[in-house]
Image (tube, grey):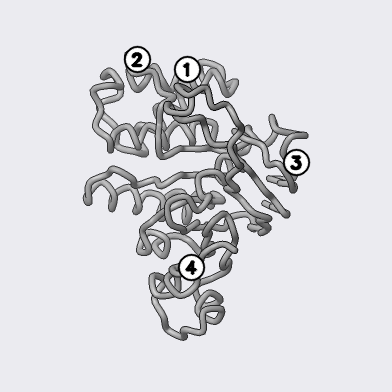
Amino acid sequence: MEVKDVTKDFIPAFSFTELLKFNFKRASTTRAIDGLSFTLNKGSSLAILGPNGAGKTTLLKILSTLILPDKGSVKINGSYLDVQDEKIKASIGFAGAAERSFYWRLTGRQNLEFFSAMYGLDKAAASSRICALFKLFGVTYQDKRFDSYSAGMQQKFALMRALIHDPPILLLDEPTKSLDYASSLELRSFIKEVLVKKQRKTLVFTTHQMDEALGFADMLMILHYGRLFAYGTLEELRRKAGMPGGSLGEIFIRLAGGSVPC
């Protein structure tokens, strides 16, 4: 994965008050990503850390081809964004934190069958893959309506959907968000032991949890105001912060805690 000088701006939506006053003057843009560059090797795991509004989700959406950067270039698995998007989509699996793309009146199984077809899997291949995922995740409630599932169950199905076509790269936006403690530990263990160690997936995920970042990431990124404040291993971040033996939380506060944009 090669990201070079990527910048992304957004224009805030008009407020209800502005619409009532017929105030249609274009608002100033908000810079979500500001000249971001980094590389990630095959089989590596990257944790993206940062406060709310740092640009973490925007970066994942760019990497997943959901939105395009205004400037810069992105190369994933040998293919360039906005040139070879279909090849990129075939090589990635994306699971967002705010999951709205499942069909709530369908069962979990029916949802995965639909997404399998979207990825071009024939019925036999889809059936085999879905059964394998149910076994892998220990799912026994696959034939219930999706709207009956708990947040933890929905999160499992989001991850199964990301894995349905067996992609080499996974993009996960806060994978344990809204999960209870036991479910969070279970999912973390699965990501670490199965996806990272056994299947050697290239993993990029966002999180607010320092222990989660250290649990299965060999590379760490600190984003703030869309800017790259630090990137590297824990030891490299310690050297950058001048904190030998410092915890990831202490390093985060040192590098980004009190910083404001110019």
Q: Which class describes the residues within 10 Å of circle 1: few (<14), some (14-19), or many (20+)?
A: some
Pick whichever, 235 or 250, lies toward us. 250
Q: Is residue 182 above or below residue 209?
A: above
Q: Residue at x 44, y 24 (%)?
A: 101
* Image marks 1 and 2: residues in contact by CB distance under 8 Å: yes
Quadrant where the C terminus sits is bottom right
Q: Residue at x 51, y 77 (%)?
A: 235
Task: Say which label, 1 or 4, has the lower sequence index.
Answer: 1
Q: Which class describes the residues within 10 Å of circle 3: few (<14), some (14-19), or many (20+)?
A: some
Task: Say which label, 3 or 1, has the lower sequence index.
Answer: 3
Report the residue marked by disc 3: 80
Residue 106 is tagged as: 2
**Residue 105 at x, y = what percent?**
32, 13
- The residues bearing labels 2 and 3 have C-alpha atoms spaced at a distance of 35 Å
Q: Residue at x 46, y 51 (%)?
A: 206
* Image marks 4 and 2: residues in contact by CB distance under 8 Å: no
Q: Type of residue at label 3?
A: Tyr
Q: How many numbered discs, if any?
A: 4
- The residues bearing labels 3 and 1 have C-alpha atoms spaced at a distance of 28 Å
Report the residue marked by disc 4: 256
Pick whichever, 103 or 62, lies toward us. 62
